[in-house]
Image: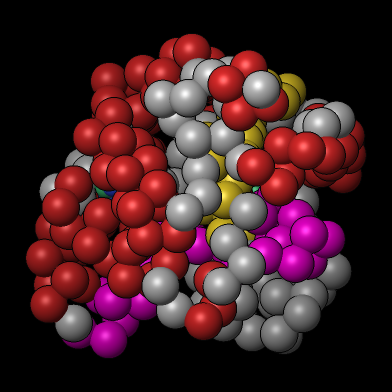
Amino acid sequence: MYLILLGAPGAGKGTQAHVLTDLIKIAHVSSGDLFRENIKNGTPIGIEAQGYINRGELVPDETVIEMIMEHLSTPACRNGALLDGFPRTIYQADALNEALREHFKEGISRVIYIKVDTDELLQRLSGRWICPVCQTPYHEINNPPRVKGKCDQEGAELYQRDDDKRSTAERRLQVYFNQTMPLIDYYKEHGLLLEINGQQPVEKVTRDIVTALEAIPANEGKKSIMLGETEESLVA
Ligand code: ADP
Ligand code: AMP
């Protein structure tokens, strides 16, 4: 099964991904986490991506597509994946659909769109702290760890991302509005979009997502929707 988490920076995609992958036992594939890992390891992808990330811009499509496709072919993703932060452009969405159809003989099951107001997004990004080991995001006010500054699972010292500082966060939101928001209509037109109110407590957002996923008819799980084919043509 392939699911996509769509939403602005700070909408709560990573937060929900950590809970959901525990519940539904599929791999969490975060393009941002993969880039940060590549940067830490000084790989060619990391070296290329760093400048874009520091400026709050998107990394070029071809680079991110190659990185994600390679990752989707690893054994960790043999049961599918919950994609977080990818796709972020129509070009990436088309490439993902084509690759899934060609190499994995499966389509996207649903796109979970987590909707949050802009003011709230900036407040969330400025208070975000992340575990360097398991990448779980916390928030100093909304979603604090049990012990200040330490990850609940790993006990590791939490850190703040450089690109969460106000000026870069504002640029990232602008980039989201211009380049990623068109994906909402793109997936809506294909009948794949589940719109979730992200401005509720974390647990309530999770519950709404699970309820929406549970409402997917069982036969769809087997057949899976391919973009370009209508639900009716699959059921027929
Ligand atoms: P994204 O992955 O979409 O960029 P995160 O999951 O990292 O977003 O969440 C951004 C920040 O908002 C984090 O500090 C997180 O703790 C906090 N957060 C996530 N979900 C909620 C929520 N439902 N209500 C309040 N704060 C939240
Ligand atoms: P995130 O952790 O999802 O907030 O991503 C951090 C940064 O990584 C983004 O601001 C982009 O610079 C880059 N990035 C992550 N995913 C993508 C993507 N799908 N396409 C292009 N750039 C990406």
* Left or right: 85, with 217 as reference point: left
Residue at 59 percent of width and 46 percent of height: 3
Instruction: Provide residue 167's location: percent of width, then percent of height.
Output: 30, 37
The residue lying toward the viewer, choosing from 220 and 65, is 220
Rendered image quadrant of residue 46 = bottom left
Residue at 45 percent of width and 30 percent of height: 227
Does any portion of residue 67 appear in the rendered image? yes
Instruction: Based on the picture, tell me whether residue 163 belongs to the magenta stretch.
Output: no
The residue lying toward the viewer, choosing from 6 and 111, is 111
Instruction: Provide residue 55's location: percent of width, then percent of height.
Output: 19, 47
The residue lying toward the viewer, choosing from 50 and 182, is 182
Q: Quadrant of the C terminus?
A: top right
* Left or right: 16, with 107 as reference point: right
Residue at 63 percent of width and 17 percent of height: 232
Does any portion of residue 5 appear in the rendered image? no
Residue at 77 percent of width and 80 percent of height: 153
Q: Is most of the magenta stretch helix, strand or loop?
A: helix
Q: Which residues are magenta?
A: 14-42
* Left or right: 33, with 117 as reference point: left
Instruction: Provide residue 51's location: percent of width, then percent of height.
Output: 13, 58
